[in-house]
Image (cartoon, rainbow, N blue to C red):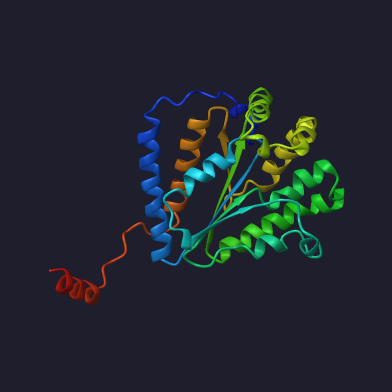
Amino acid sequence: MIDLADYERGHKYKGDYKADLAALQTRLEHVQVAHIAHDRAAVVMFEGWDAAGKGGIIQRLVAEWDQRNFEVFPIAAPTAEEKAHDFLWRFRNRLPAPGNIAVFDRSWYGRVLVERVEGYATPEEWERGYGEINAFETDMAAAGVTLVKLFVHITQKEQDKRLRARLDDPWKRWKTGLDDFRNRAKRAAYLEAMHTMFARTDTGRAPWIVIDGNDKKAARIAALNAIADRLEAAVPMEPPPLDPEVERVARQALG
């Protein structure tokens, strides 16, 4: 059972952060090339508290990736068109083609988190959502899509510190809004929803990875390591072979 209280230590990162991050980004660059070369698709999905650091992790995840073969989807409230379909429709439409990786900044788990807590979904809808989500992720795996599910956790104290910094720094104010503080006031209800979500959707095929986000540097390294581990396990990691004809022509041209 996942208990978020186990992810609140917030130990400072003790390694050489810049060197370790650079090595991880090189590793992740190779992971993307392997997906391109072997026509494999993957989804990396982030959930977590407001101000938990999801955006900073995503920024460093994709820093060395080829822009032609990945896309980041920041998930907001559904549009009128999206509301006309079932809640998974907008996510099905964004699943990656072979050779591509999709990154979701928030996800289909909104049905059993924000929609449950804020009353946007009825109890019948969000209760049914667990089975619908598990079936969706099973279908994803059957289609050959590797799914990595991360939840970035921070304490109330750390969240308050970061929300305060967003108010004090005029270049960060765009990151915060009334929703952050409405959600903050319902932390107990969100914690209950989160623990139910873990209990109902932490499966062998699509396990949850919880990241202690209370130290940003440690969280970034832990998250990128976890993503690299899971993606590497799902794709052959040999570099693509050089086409003999390309090599012959190239050596004639280049000497």
Task: Using the rendered image of the protein, determine whether residue 24 is visible from the camera's viewpoint.
Answer: yes
* 59 to the left or right of 89: left
Q: Residue furthest left?
A: 255
As rendered, which of 219 and 76 lies closer to the eye? 76
Identify the residue at image location x=52%, y=34%: 219
As rendered, which of 22 and 13 lies closer to the eye? 22
Identify the residue at image location x=59%, y=29%: 7
Where is the C terminus found, in terms of image quarters? Answer: bottom left
Q: Position of residue 151 (x, y in %)?
A: 61, 40
* 254 to the left or right of 52: left
Task: Using the rendered image of the protein, determine whether residue 226 is visible from the camera's viewpoint.
Answer: no
Q: Position of residue 98 (x, y in %)?
A: 50, 67
Q: Position of residue 198 (x, y in %)?
A: 67, 42
Residue 211 image-quadrant placement: top right
* 46 to the left or right of 62: right
Identify the residue at image location x=26%, y=68%: 242
From what the image shows, is residue 189 above or below residue 62?
Answer: above
Identify the residue at image location x=76%, y=62%: 82
Count of number-bearing discs:
0
Where is the N terminus found, in terms of image quarters? Answer: top right
